[in-house]
Image (cartoon, rainbow, N blue to C red):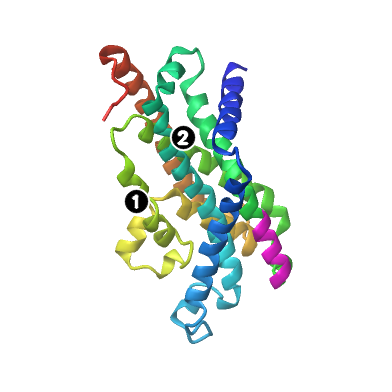
Amino acid sequence: MNWINGMWAEMVKSHQHNFHSKMIYLSLFFWPVLLFITSYFALKPFDLGSTSPIAEFFDPDDLMLFLLTGYLGYIFFWSLVQSAWQTSYERQTGTLELIFLTPVSRLAFVYGRAAGNLFEAVWLFSVFTVLMLVIVGGMQSIVWSALPLAFVILIVSAVIWGGFLNVVFLFSRDASFLFTILEEPMEFFAGIRLPVAAFPVWGKVIAYIFPLTFVLEMIRGLVVEGKSFTELLSPFAWLVGILSLLFLLTIILLNKAEKNAKETGNMVLF
């Protein structure tokens, strides 16, 4: 119960701190929409017919649906990269010390921060995705019965990813380089704009580093292609393996950071 209360309290605090203006919601809507439109019209001038090389990997007629699902997953994950970057200010303003003095679970704090920012940041683009499906007539292509499972996979994966990033940004002297590393590479290699199967071997290796790669494969397989869960056991096993590793690293880093803070009085671990 204390774990849940601590997580909920951090979600409320994060909401009050980061979402205090209507203009913030406006930017959260237009930024991902512009990303989607830019990607769509960047691909549209090229040959996307049956003779296109990309037709070997997915149906070009489903380009709109492919990009919508890709950017929906990307917004979930990228919003938590931004959230983790903002979390570093907890250390700079001295509020992190107060958090360590409270009996609240450290995991509840990092996952509460991740979950709070996630739900606030993505609901507008989720609404946009539904509207686009209505406009372009893609509603009939969706396997609606698989949608709840797809969203559970997406939300759980994003929160675990966000919790790990929160810990890294909290206790690093300067993790701003991760902000750059996790922006363009994740958008390009995770299968958001192009199928991962179309990449060369070295590109696939990079793609498999990101849990979003397997999340999108699961979502598109379940919701767009109508595959059963058993047909997607391979990407699911990869996803569980990556998320388990991230969860383990989150616990290890949290414990190490707290031990280091008690011994040295320094909130910076690395």
| Residue 234 in sight from this viewpoint | no
At a point 30% along the width and 62% down the height, the residue shown is 202
- The local secondary structure at tag 1 comes to helix
Disc 2 versus disc 1: nearer the observer? 1
Task: Tell me the residue that label 1 is attached to.
Answer: 180
Q: Is residue 269 magenta?
A: no
Percent coordinates x, y for residue 23 in the rendering: 60, 48
Percent coordinates x, y for residue 35 in the rendering: 51, 62
Quarter-wise, where is residue 92 in the image? top left
Q: Considering the whole magenta stretch, tell me its main secondary structure.
A: helix
Mark-to-mark CA distance, 2 and 1: 18 Å
Q: Mark number for residue 163?
A: 2
Q: Disc 2 marks which amino acid? A: Gly
Residue interval drawn in magenta: 127-136
Percent coordinates x, y for residue 187 in the rendering: 43, 58
At a point 36% along the width and 61% down the height, the residue shown is 204
Decide which of 227, 250 is in the foreground and name it: 250
Figure label count: 2
Quarter-wise, where is residue 167 in the image? top left
Decide which of 224, 7 is in the foreground and name it: 7
Contact flag, marks 2 and 1 (Cβ < 8 Å): no
